Amino acid sequence: MSISIVLVEDHKIVREGTRQLLEQSADMQVVGEASDGLEAIDLAGRLQPNVMVMDVRLPKLNGIEATRTITVQFPMIKILILSAHDDDSYVFPLLDAGASGYLLKTSSGAELAEAIRTVFAGQTVLSPRIREKIISRLSGRQAYQTLDMPEWITDREMDVLRAAAHGQANKMIASQLGISTQTVQVHLRNIFSKLNVGSRSEAVARAIQNGWITLEALDE
């Protein structure tokens, strides 16, 4: 099964280059292109792609509002942000709007393709710089304390959460812990439910805030 993709980018030459890169992968098909936020919403409804690769600065309707509208109206569509900008005023509103990942345009074609596969699989992708911003904001918002783990989070769930915090994909977590990828997915769903969050990045943020994962540990 190929992953259907819509590219949302106002520069035609960038769209063409991105399309050529992605279509070198046998498991990907670019089914549409949009040059502004309103067109992106229209194509989301008409084409129902698996993934939309979205720029931030768009004519008519910016990427933040387009992402928010699409994730509400078409929750099965995954949004991967691909932007040259890592400003806080873009990063955090886009993640709040429901983007599944945020990649910088300094990434390689192979990194973009792998990020698309990752968000398609229901996981979160963040460029290292974006991940640093999230951690920095959390650590600046409040000094965390090392707290005892709540009894309702199991040791194995915590193992999975720590591995996710290091950016490991489900397959790698499964190999490391000696369990199946399906079991990893079950643990992640349980973690999301217990922490009342909807993504890996939110779960990791909550763990850092509560001192269950330290910033030092993430740098190891």
Image (cartoon, rainbow, N blue to C red):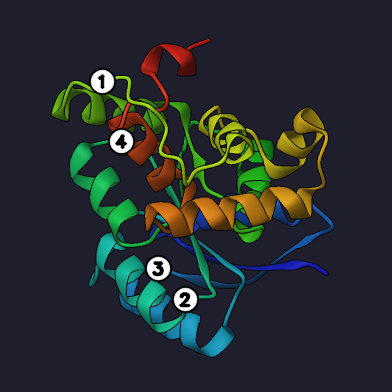
Q: Which of marks 1 and 2 is nearer the N terminus?
A: 2
- The image position of residue 218, as x and y in percent, is 47, 19
Q: Are marks 1 and 3 in contact (CB under 8 Å)?
A: no
Q: How far apart are marks 2 and 4 (CA)?
A: 25 Å
Q: Residues within 10 Å of mark 1 (few under 14, many from 20)?
A: few
Q: Is mark 2 on a helix, strand or loop?
A: loop
Q: Relative to 35, is 174 on the left or the right? A: right
Q: Distance between the residues labelled 1 and 3?
A: 46 Å
- The image position of residue 35, as x and y in percent, is 40, 68
Residue at label 4?
A: 86
Q: Give the foreground label among 2 and 3.
A: 2
Numbered circles on residues, count: 4
Residue at label 1?
A: 145
Q: Relative to 46, is 129 on the left or the right? A: left
Q: In which quarter of the image is residue 39?
A: bottom left
Query: With respect to residue 162, does 65 lie above or below?
Result: below
Residue at label 2?
A: 75
Find the residue positioned furthest to the front: 151
Q: Distance between the residues labelled 1 and 4?
A: 29 Å
Q: Earlier in the sequence, mark 2 or mark 4?
A: 2
Q: How crowded is mark 4: few (under 14 residues within 10 Å), some or many (20 or more)?
A: some
- The image position of residue 59, as x and y in percent, is 26, 66
Front position in the image: 153 or 20:
153
Q: Residues within 10 Å of mark 2 (few under 14, many from 20)?
A: few
Q: Which of marks 4 and 3 is nearer the N terminus?
A: 3
Front position in the image: 206 or 109:
206
